[in-house]
Image: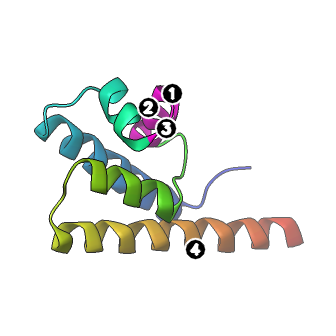
């Protein structure tokens, strides 16, 4: 099954932004994973766009990176949108 283009773009946007924020904070993926109580491989999958993170995952990452509230709010909205798009597309695909 392929991912709907809009869903893929939201995921790529989110992934790239999270990676940039981590690098700007001067943290390795491994160090961020420790701060978030996640595996390093999960952080890597999220940042590469291979995994669509939950809102809770992104909130934990943003908290660990000490991202300002206004930026965090925008990224959480993007996460919600990406998850809704993915769920909607998946429902359509299952119906055939």
User: Residue 33 placed where, x, y %?
Assistant: 40, 34
- Secondary structure of the residue carrying tag 3 is loop
Q: Nearer the viewer, residue 74 or 10?
A: 74
Location of mark 1 (residue): 41
Image: magenta residue range: 37-48
Numbered circle sitting on residue 84: 4
Left/right of residue 39 with respect to residue 34 in the rendered view: right
Give how far apart the Cα atoms at labels 1 and 4 are.
24 Å
Give how far apart the Cα atoms at labels 3 and 2 are.
10 Å
Location of mark 2 (residue): 44
User: Residue 14 placed where, x, y %?
Assistant: 36, 55
User: Residue 44 placed where, x, y %?
Assistant: 43, 31
Q: Main secondary structure of the magenta part?
A: helix
Query: For the residues carrying marks 1 and 4, which lies nearer the camera in this image?
Result: 1
Cβ atoms at labels 3 and 1 below 8 Å apart: no
User: What residue lies at 59% left-to-right and 61% top-to-bottom?
Assistant: 4
Q: Nearer the viewer, residue 21 or 15?
A: 21
Cβ atoms at labels 1 and 4 below 8 Å apart: no
Left/right of residue 10 with respect to residue 69 in the rendered view: right
């Amino acid at each position: 099954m392929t991912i709907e283009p809009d869903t893929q773009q939201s995921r790529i946007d989110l992934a790239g932004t999270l990676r940039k924020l981590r690098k700007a904070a001067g943290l390795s993926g491994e160090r961020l994973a420790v701060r978030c109580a996640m595996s390093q491989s999960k952080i890597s999958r999220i940042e590469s766009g291979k995994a669509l993170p939950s809102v809770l995952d992104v909130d934990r990452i943003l908290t660990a990176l000490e991202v300002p509230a206004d930026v965090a709010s925008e990224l959480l909205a993007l996460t919600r949108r990406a998850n809704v798009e993915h769920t909607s597309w998946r429902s359509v695909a299952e119906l055939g």
